[in-house]
Amino acid sequence: MKKIFVLCMTIVLLFSYVGCTGTAQTEQNETQQNAVAEESTQTSYPVTLTDQAGREVTIEAQPEKIVSGYYISTSLLIALGQEDKLVGIEAKADERPIYRLSAPELIELPNVGSAKQFDLEGCAALEPDLVILPLKLSDAAETLTELGIPVLLVNPEDQALSDEMREIVSTALNCKEQADALEEFVAKQQEFLAEATANSENPTVYLAGNSSFLSTAGSKMYQNSLITLAGGKNVAAEITDTYWAEIDYEQLLAWDPDYIVIAAEADYGVEDVYTDPNLSDLRAVKENRVYVMPDSAEAWDSPVPGGILGAVWLCGILQEDVSEDTVNSIIGEFYETFYGFTYEETI
């Protein structure tokens, strides 16, 4: 009997040991996996990246001084928590509410001009570790590169390219964790939009430009993706221009859209559309379906990090089952999470 007891105790202790060992091994494996995952999100310098002009750009060390000559990349840097590294910024920064609301110190930074008139000397004098410019400034990028200053050219002209820009910039700056959080938010809203528009009848939409009512965005422009994500059909999709295309009244009357959306920051308003006698026969005018995209924080009809909100807002207009409260909740969450202010206070 004593031998049986000892044998049983030995078996119990053996299983206990194996269990403890297994648990310890599992915990060790999880720790190693977490370490590998964390390491994979870290940028190892020097790093060579391909920018959106197809140029290979080598960054020797983590940039501490950045110049952004493009409001899209500047807004992204704020969302990624990198605004403290900015030493120079694009012109007219004081006209952008998003800076005043989230990072007012940026407004006081030296400006390096615009895509039309870029200040090469002023940019170089700031001795940046990295410069981010729009594709239009490829000549300036080559000159700065010759001076030994790495430059990333970006071109976020649709949602996929916007996502690609986020990946490139976050890798360059070693802030993938923040970028992943932003990517997760965008993906979540894309899922929401897909569900909300699953049974949509795809109402037709005319998106009017901010400088002229008779200019519009075709299928090759970022604004087209906002319409399709919201469950609408862009009446101007047949236009393949990569910039605002001019049309005439006859063309618009032929399209006869269900909805008219005026771009953010437009020089005109809804009342101008309703009182234009040339537009009185349009379905959207007759049914009071003319709207202006909000711009109290930034223009959502541009490929800024918050551009997905343009699709969410438009979905609330086009889809009856999507409530205003739902839309406002999503918008509020975005700005509180990535920009640190309350959106409702801007309205």
Image: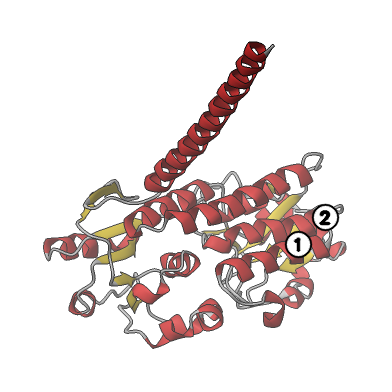
**What residue sits 70% from the left and 57% below the top?**
312
| Residue 248 horizontal/vertical position (percent) | 62, 60
Q: What residue is shown with label 1?
A: 327
Quadrant where the C terminus sits is: bottom right
Q: Along the horizontal axis of the image, is 106 left or right of 23? A: left
With 156 as the anchor, is 141 left or right in this view? Answer: left
Q: Amino acid at mark 1?
A: Val
Tell me if residue 151 can be seen: yes
| Residue in front for this viewpoint, 303 or 11 | 11
Q: Determine crowd level at label 1: few under 14, some 14-19, many 20+ residues with C-alpha closer than 10 A.
A: some
Q: Quadrant of residue 144?
A: bottom left
Q: Position of residue 51 (x, y in %)?
A: 31, 50
Q: Nearer the viewer, residue 215 or 50?
A: 50
In this view, 341 is above or below 214: below
Q: Residue at x 67, y 71 (%)?
A: 294
Can you say which quadrant of the picture contains the N terminus?
A: top right
Q: Nearer the viewer, residue 306 or 205?
A: 306
Residue 159: image tag: none
- Determine the residue located farthest toward the bottom in the rendered image: 108
Spatial CA distance of label 1 from label 2 is 7 Å
Query: Could you say whether the residue bearing mark 1 is in a helix, strand or loop?
Result: helix
| N-terminal label among 1 and 2 | 2
Q: Secondary structure at mark 2?
A: loop
Task: Give coordinates of residue 331: x percent, y percent.
Answer: 68, 65
Q: Label 2 is placed on what type of residue?
A: Val
- Is any part of residue 135 visible from this angle? no
Residue where numbered disc 2 is placed: 322
